[in-house]
Amino acid sequence: MAVEESKETPENKDVPKKGSLMMFILIGVGALLLGAGGSFFFLNKPPVEKASASEAKAESEEEEEEVVEGEEDEIIIYTLEPFVVNLTDTPESRYLKVTINLDLIKTEYSENLTAHLPQIRDSLLILFSSKDYASIRSVEGKMELRDEILQRINGVFNKKKVKTAYFMDFVTQ
């Protein structure tokens, strides 16, 4: 009697088929790409600022004034050199490195800003060095700092010449 040998050997039982292995890999890669895309989308959303009704009304009035004056609606960005300052933390030394871009209201203000650059840099250096790490590490602290920057710069001119300030680098150590 001849014993028929089984085509399935113990070695072949543990090895998955190539088609199912390839399908498993494709599903894994697809899930990874979807997760990465979703993370990118949610992490790169601009922050939503909540403003009170009085602030919103004041901002809308300022925008109306700008339109009435016939000011240009183009974007004029002025880049300041980076600032590196010591923060006022007493137990340990902490540093702040910040690069700021300014959104100007009119093109001709860039020349005026350049002429007053020493006063602006001095005012901002004093502002930054008066801060401590705890006050600027939160989002709210950064927003307050941005408002203080605008007040200082526009205070040099006694007129609103800068719409907003953008932090391009903000590193604390």
Image: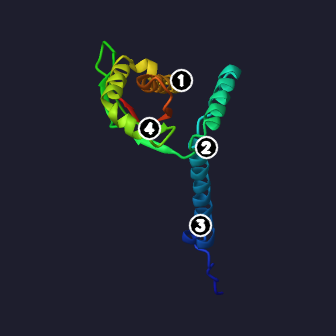
| Location of residue 117 (image quadrant) | top left
Q: Amino acid at mark 3?
A: Leu
Quick check: marks 2 and 1 in contact, CB under 8 Å?
no
| Amino acid tagged 2 | Phe
Q: What coloring was used for the rendering?
A: rainbow
Camera-nearest label, 2 or 3: 2
Mark 3: few/some/many CA within 10 Å (<14, 14-19, 20+): few
Residue closest to the eye, 162 or 137: 162
- Identified by mark 1, the residue type is Glu
Reading the image, the residue beneath label 1 is 140
Closer mark to the observer between disc 3 and disc 4 = 4
Distance from Cα at disc 2 to Cα at disc 1: 20 Å
Between 5 and 83, the one lying in front of the other is: 83
**CA distance separating discs 4 and 2:** 36 Å
Label 1 and label 3: CA atoms lie apart by: 50 Å
Left or right, 138 with reference to 53: left
Q: Which residue is mark 3?
A: 21
Expressed as whole percent of the image width and height from the top left, the position of residue 127 reads 38, 20
Image disc number at residue 109: 4
Q: CA distance from mark 3 to mark 4?
A: 64 Å
Q: Residues within 10 Å of mark 2 (few under 14, many from 20)?
A: few
Q: Earlier in the sequence, mark 1 or mark 4?
A: 4
Mark 1 residue crowding within 10 angstroms, few (<14) / some (14–19) / many (20+)? few
Q: Tell me residue 70's x, y (percent).
A: 60, 40
Residue at 59 percent across and 68 percent down: it is 22
Q: What mark, if any, has residue 42 been given in the picture?
A: 2
User: SS for tag 1?
Assistant: helix
The N terminus - image quarter:
bottom right
Considering only order in the chain, which callout, 4 or 3, is on the residue closer to the N terminus?
3
